Image (spheres, helix red, strand yellow):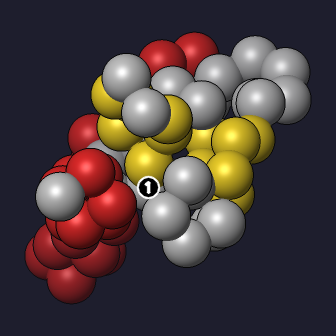
Amino acid sequence: MKYLVLLLIVLAGIWWIRQQHKPDQTSSQKSGPQVMVPCTHCGTHVPEDDAIRSAKGLYCSTAHRDSHEG
């Protein structure tokens, strides 16, 4: 009997841990497709929201922005 109670406690603990680590579906996913823009330096396409903006274009990283703009 004590093993059955111990098993139930372990299973409840596993269930509780999995519930705590479940990602929030509404905040982690953006609705609809994202606009992809090419990096001015290397041409790699990145989501427009993640692109580094400057007066001379859009870049995939600050290193490419600094390299291209000198």
The answer to whether residue 4 is left or right of residue 60 is: left
Q: Which residue is mark 1?
A: 60
Q: How many marks?
A: 1
Vertical order, 4 against 18 (above or below)? below
Residue at the spot 74% in from the left edge and 41% down from the top edge: 36
The answer to whether residue 68 is left or right of residue 50 is: left
Is any atom of residue 49 visible in this view? Answer: yes
Q: Residue at the front extreme?
A: 70
Q: Residue at the bottom extreme?
A: 3
Residue at the spot 27% in from the left edge and 41% down from the top edge: 20
Vertical order, 14 against 21 (above or below)? below
Give the structural element (helix, strand or loop) at label 1.
loop
In the rendered image, residue 52, in percent from the top left (x then y), is placed at 36, 37
Callout 1 crowding tier (Cα within 10 Å): few <14, some 14–19, many ≥20: many
Q: Picture quarter containing residue 12?
A: bottom left
Q: Give the camera-side residue of 37 and 56.
A: 56
In the rendered image, residue 26, in percent from the top left (x then y), is placed at 57, 16
Residue at the spot 43% in from the left edge and 33% down from the top edge: 56
Vertical order, 25 against 23 (above or below)? above
The answer to whether residue 58 is left or right of residue 1 is: right
Q: Give the camera-side residue of 60 and 9.
A: 60
In the rendered image, residue 4, in percent from the top left (x then y), is placed at 30, 74
Q: Give the camera-side residue of 10 and 20.
A: 20
Q: Which quarter of the image is occupied by the C terminus?
A: bottom left
Vertical order, 55 against 59 (above or below)? above
Is any atom of residue 12 visible in this view? Answer: no
Say which amino acid is labelled 1.
Answer: Cys
Q: Give the camera-side residue of 11 and 41.
A: 41
Q: Which quarter of the image is occupied by the N terminus?
A: bottom left
